Image: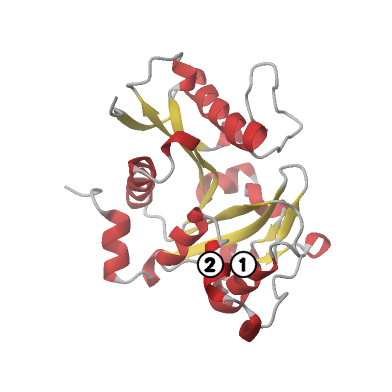
Amino acid sequence: MDPQFKLKLAETPQELQAAQRLRYKVFVEELGGHGAMVDDAARLERDRFDPHFDHLILMDEALEVDPIDKVVGVYRLLPSDRAETLGRFYSEDEYDLSTLKASGRKLLELGRSCLHPAYRGGAAMFHLWNGLASYVFDNEIEILFGVASFHGTDPEELAAPLSLLHHRHLAPEYLRTRAQPEHFQSMDLIAEDQIDRRAAMLAVPALIKAYLRLGGFVGEGAFVDHAFNTTDVCLIMDTTRMNEKQKALYTRGTQA
């Protein structure tokens, strides 16, 4: 059966719980993560920041399942004006965001991005990207950022892809976030001329590669998140630096 996609911002407690159910399937059941507010009985991955974010959800209406299990894609979004009200961004525990916050430009923090395993590599990600692009356009966002993850917590096992990101895709200084000093994990683990670039790029998760193709960068240093069983990097994208081809890819279908 062909999927019947519906994309929207969560508006009800039930829709938020559907987003949290997918996050539980991916981050807890698939990747082995956990957190203080995870509800194992209800199978919901949640935290104290959820009420302050917008939750972009992609549903497959063709699924003959309980409504809470129809969400197959999620993005969690926090624009800078709401972060000011909240007093912080989610990722400030991991990264020093002072360069971005001092820029005077409108920021959007992205997080908890995930797709149901059955929908990876197909049209679902394209629908999510279009929804995100519409949100960016409607809210006049200038800089997008957020943490993205490698599975696993051993930097030595991830040395090649982390080093490739550090040498080839480090953000310019005016955009460069830096892992908090108490958690800083160097990404400069292998000299650039010693990296097998093809193998290293194959080890970079698809979401990170997608941002790099759109002109994105990474911050300096990684954060090893033992609770979520991941190693995180900070992705940053300045929409004004995207060339016309990249903008067309990113904003396709967002304007009439």
Is disc 1 placed on a helix, strand or loop? helix
Q: Is residue 243 above or below residue 61?
A: below
Is disc 2 placed on a helix, strand or loop? helix
Which quadrant of the figure has residue 46?
top right
- In the image, what residue occupies the spot 70% across and 37% down? 32
* Residue pointed to by mark 2: 201
Number of numbered discs overlaid on the protein picture: 2
Dot 2, how many residues are within 10 Å of its Cα: few (below 14), some (14-19), or many (20+)? some
Q: Position of residue 57 (x, y in %)?
A: 43, 33
- In the image, what residue occupies the spot 53% across and 63% down? 202
* Residue pointed to by mark 1: 161
Q: Amino acid at mark 2?
A: Met
Which quadrant of the figure has residue 101?
bottom right
In which quadrant will I find the N terminus?
top left
CA gap, disc 2 and disc 1: 6 Å
Which quadrant of the figure has residue 205?
bottom right
Q: For this view, does 217 lie left or right of residue 1?
A: right
Question: Given contact means CB atoms under 8 Å apart, are the residues at marks 2 and 1 in contact?
Answer: yes
Q: For this view, does 235 lie left or right of residue 223?
A: left
